[in-house]
Image (cartoon, coloured by chain):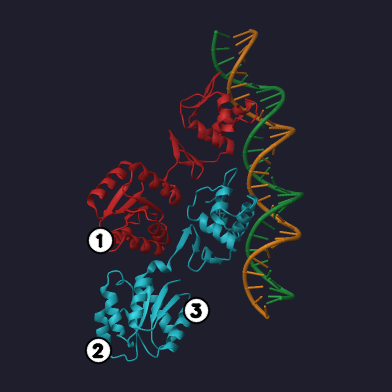
Chain colours: A red, B cyan, C orange, D green
Amino acid sequence: MSANIIIVEDEKDLATLLKYNLSKEGFKIKEAETGQEGLQLIKRELPDLVILDWMLPDFSGIEVCRQIKRDNKLKSIPVIMLTAKSEIEDKVRGLEMGVDDYITKPFNNKELILRVKSLLKRFKPSLLDDSSVFKDLKIDRITRKVFRDNHEIKLGPTEYKLLDFLIKSPQRVYSREQLLNNVWGETINVESRTVDVHIRRLRKAINLNKKADLIRTVRSSGYSLDS
Amino acid sequence: MSANIIIVEDEKDLATLLKYNLSKEGFKIKEAETGQEGLQLIKRELPDLVILDWMLPDFSGIEVCRQIKRDNKLKSIPVIMLTAKSEIEDKVRGLEMGVDDYITKPFNNKELILRVKSLLKRFKPSLLDDSSVFKDLKIDRITRKVFRDNHEIKLGPTEYKLLDFLIKSPQRVYSREQLLNNVWGETINVESRTVDVHIRRLRKAINLNKKADLIRTVRSSGYSLDS
DNA sequence: TGATATTTAAAAATTTTTTTACAAAACTTA
DNA sequence: TAAGTTTTGTAAAAAAATTTTTAAATATCA
């Protein structure tokens, strides 16, 4: 996840701390110290998320938030407000202004990261890239698409789930039983030969036109994604 | 366009006329009769534009304007001045005070609307543009219109909301449940098959006459805007 | 080579989606 | 407010896609 975050915070120490912690998570951070400066930066950078201090020297964070939520180009950017106090009325006012989440100071780093991620998930799901790659094979779980060598491959639901499962632990061999349990589900009662048929279809699809076979048959054991 | 406009005008008849004409264009109007009152209202509401009469009972419009342009929170609000006379020196004084445009009484309604729109376009371009585009499909949330290849498409409320939602994350696959939650709302209790029917209606509408289908069915998963 | 395991193909069964039609509900407008 | 219109949700048949089963063919290995 490499979302861009703007922090509007006048307390230098806190800003530095925030930046340090969020950068460690792979976020790209830009900072501003005043509301005015922050708003300009936000308009220019169109970040994926904004962290705002409630109390700022020029005009309060709440005002910056109001401006963000009013502007059609900005209003879809989630805003986290840092408040010293956790008073109800502040929360209510913030909610009215469209604040998307709060963190009350002093706060714990884990909580901050958690909230940032959860907001990003809600507002910009596509940033939370949920995909797996094995060799030139890629599965994207957001769009539910599969690619081999950058060409899209169409898979039926079962073949998709099979690949989805196998690609999580390439090389590892799974028995037919294990595949049935994990891909089909414990309850379903299906012949174990069925797995073979689906493996074949998956093979056929991903090995289309002279591509090397990425599925290994392990005689009397099962199958694995391998080469 | 749904900008908020504050009119500061003491002549009731003129105020009413202005309000009527501007409302008809979709603007949201608030009124004040005196400069003092107006300034308060402006501070509280932070409108997108202010229409000021030059001559006001308490202190002149020009004074209100000066105060607006002095205040960091307000100075980015465009101001239109209504003047009875069109004398050069007034214009110059106004210009110095930061008036953004003039209209001389008596004025014509078309001209007023034109100037308001042109100022808004200059100062708050985002108000005029809240739209999303995917391929040759466009949704304009300000006018609530949808276009395919520049031809307008009529959509019922649910189809509109469905498209509005889908187009925010093209490619992404949503389950019927997710669509129900996001388009219909969490509370509503509706069969998930209903989604299919609305998807079909949306498809029918946007794929009118041999246009490529922009909606992807992902069997056993849901739908996405895609191609 | 013979026993065992896997692949392949094709038919049958099942699941899922599309389409159509209709009645109920909500909304317009005269 | 009543009549007319649009929109919505559901059901059910038709169509399409996918899965499972079956069985024969093929491959592997000791």
The label shown at residue B24 is: 3
State the CA–CA distance, disc 3 to disc 1.
Answer: 41 Å
Tell me the SS state at disc 2.
Answer: helix
Residue B31 against residue B128 in the figure, above or below: below
Q: Are marks 1 and 2 on the same chain?
A: no
Please report, as a chain letter, where disc 1 is located: A
| Residue at the spot 23% in from the left edge and 51% down from the top edge | A12
- The Cα–Cα distance between marks 2 and 3, rounded to whole angstroms, is 34 Å
Q: Which residue is mark 1?
A: A57
Query: Where is residue A136, by image quadrant?
Result: top left
Q: Is residue B223 depicted above or below A215 in this figure?
A: below
Neighbour tally class for label 1: few under 14, some 14-19, many 20 plus, Cα within 10 Å? few
Residue linked to disc 2: B89
The residue drawn where x is 43% and y is 80% is: B113
Residue B47 location, quadrant: bottom left
| Location of residue A161 in the rendering, given as x and y in whole percent from the top left corner | 55, 36
Pointer 3 indicates a residue of which chain? B
Front residue (pair A206, A131) = A131
Residue A149 visible here: no
Q: Check if mark 3 and mark 1 are on a common chain.
A: no
- Amino acid residing under circle 2: Glu
